[in-house]
Image (cartoon, rainbow, N blue to C red):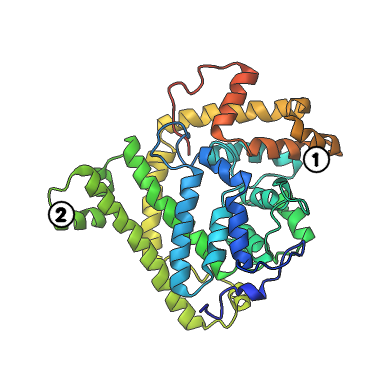
């Protein structure tokens, strides 16, 4: 039984291209399945989360991160009586638009695409699921439901209007504007509770696994984490309960307690806020003017301290910054080259090149191609086109 404020499958606003309902899957289950089977989803296997994808088999990639986000989203959504299939679908799609080389690659693409309408990974995810996936006979994209598209666009909050918290001023990224012009996603409201769950699940997952990966990389130690809120008490509890535990088990037990505290906090806060607000429908959630799914204020402040630590000790570590410069140079080389010589793009992209009406549309095609690259492929292409066979021989990390 779903809560009255959950997204009800039989009340979906449907798909841009009408389809017959499945006899054994809900609309949101079909969305989830189409995302999992998409080419963009498979490419996440070789896209960076924090470390260059070939640096080690145990570091997170965008794919393993996405799977962890989906697991957290299903757990929280299930406890709250929300639609777990929709929460999972949004979680699985939330990183489809990421470039190679993580946020470093996105920063480079934002700068390079500034003259052509900008670049944003959430907007690019929409472009992928509405245009760039080309496998179905009846439509481009995946023809997802309105609710899943809304969740991809707005899981971090309203994009326009008084309640927005956009990173940049100015017009909407072109990829988002195009989709919204075709089908109004009500960008001035909050998303469904399911999409909000996917967003907080992203925060939970990366806060947890970046601590794991940072320890494994040697950028900081367990002793460093003993000095921080949230992580320090978790290690102390493990030491009391399991004195003398070996290092790897101690680390795992402590960080699973950090993970558990975050999930339990989100659930408790959401239950209290839902009880107080008494929303009667998903539209009540959308028009509340604030998020219903969030951390408590005390835990949020503690996590800010942990994230500040990660920023300085991991994301901006000297070894990381050196690799940031290198991969930025790769993107800075590849994008202008393909823009000057679009004939270098693969044959299957030449129809898009021919259809480009001007440099702006050509730049957007080039951005689609470069943004879709995996770390591995971007490095290989740069080596092939610019002749730097020693690049990344020593490896490195990037944020």
Which disc, if any, is residue 242?
A: 2
In this rendering, is residue 54 above or below 120? above
In the image, taking residue 362 as reference, residue 238 lies left or right, namely left
Q: Quadrant of residue 79?
A: bottom left
The percent position of residue 257, horizontal first and vertical second, equals: 29, 58
Residue 317 vs residue 380, the one in the foreground? 380
Label 2: which secondary element: loop
Which residue lies at the image location 52% right of the left edge and 59% below the top edge? 199
Where is residue 170? Give x, y as percent: 71, 52
Q: Nearer the viewer, residue 108 or 199?
A: 199
Read off the residue under disc 1.
Answer: 361
Q: Which labelled disc corresponds to residue 239? A: none
Instruction: Residue 117: give x, y in percent of width and height.
Output: 74, 45
Furthest residue in direction left, as rendered:
243
* Mark closer to the observer (1, 2): 2
- Taking the image as shown, residue 78 lies to the left or right of residue 259, namely right
178 horizontally vs 109: left or right: right
Q: Residue at x 36, y 51 (%)?
A: 306
Q: What residue sits 77% from the left and 51% below the top?
A: 137
């Amino acid at each position: 039984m779903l809560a009255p404020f959950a997204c009800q499958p039989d009340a979906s606003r449907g798909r841009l291209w009408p389809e017959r309902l499945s006899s054994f899957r809900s609309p949101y289950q079909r969305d989830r399945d189409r995302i999992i089977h998409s080419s963009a989803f498979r490419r996440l296997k070789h896209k960076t989360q924090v470390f260059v994808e070939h640096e080690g088999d145990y570091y997170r990639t965008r794919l393993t991160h996405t799977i962890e986000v989906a697991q957290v989203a299903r757990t929280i959504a299930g406890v709250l009586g929300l639609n777990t299939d929709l929460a999972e679908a949004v979680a699985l799609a939330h990183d489809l638009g990421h470039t190679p080389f993580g946020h470093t690659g996105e920063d480079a693409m934002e700068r390079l695409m500034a003259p052509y309408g900008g670049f944003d990974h959430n907007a690019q995810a929409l472009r992928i699921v509405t245009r760039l996936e080309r496998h179905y006979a009846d439509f481009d994209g995946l023809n997802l439901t309105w609710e899943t598209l809304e969740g991809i666009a707005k899981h971090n909050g309203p994009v326009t209007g008084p309640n927005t918290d956009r990173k940049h001023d100015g017009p909407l990224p072109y990829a988002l504007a195009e989709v919204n012009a075709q089908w109004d996603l009500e960008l001035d409201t909050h998303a469904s509770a399911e999409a909000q769950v996917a967003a907080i699940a992203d925060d939970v997952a990366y806060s947890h696994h970046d601590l794991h990966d940072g320890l494994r990389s040697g950028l900081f130690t367990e002793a460093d984490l003993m000095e921080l809120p949230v992580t320090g008490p978790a290690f102390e509890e493990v030491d009391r309960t399991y004195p003398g535990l070996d290092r790897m088990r101690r680390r795992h037990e402590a960080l699973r307690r950090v993970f558990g505290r975050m999930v339990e906090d989100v659930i408790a806060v959401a239950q209290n806020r839902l009880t107080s607000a008494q929303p009667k429908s998903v539209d009540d959630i959308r028009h509340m003017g604030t998020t219903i799914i969030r951390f408590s204020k005390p835990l949020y402040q503690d996590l800010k301290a942990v994230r500040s630590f990660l920023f300085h000790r991991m994301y901006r570590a000297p070894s990381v910054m050196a690799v940031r410069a290198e991969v930025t140079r790769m993107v800075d080389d590849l994008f202008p080259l393909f823009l000057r010589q679009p004939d270098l793009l693969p044959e299957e992209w030449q129809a898009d090149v021919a259809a480009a009406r001007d440099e702006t549309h050509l730049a957007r095609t080039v951005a689609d191609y470069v943004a879709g690259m995996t770390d591995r492929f971007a490095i290989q292409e740069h080596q092939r086109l610019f002749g730097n066979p020693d690049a990344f021989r020593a490896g490195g990390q990037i944020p």
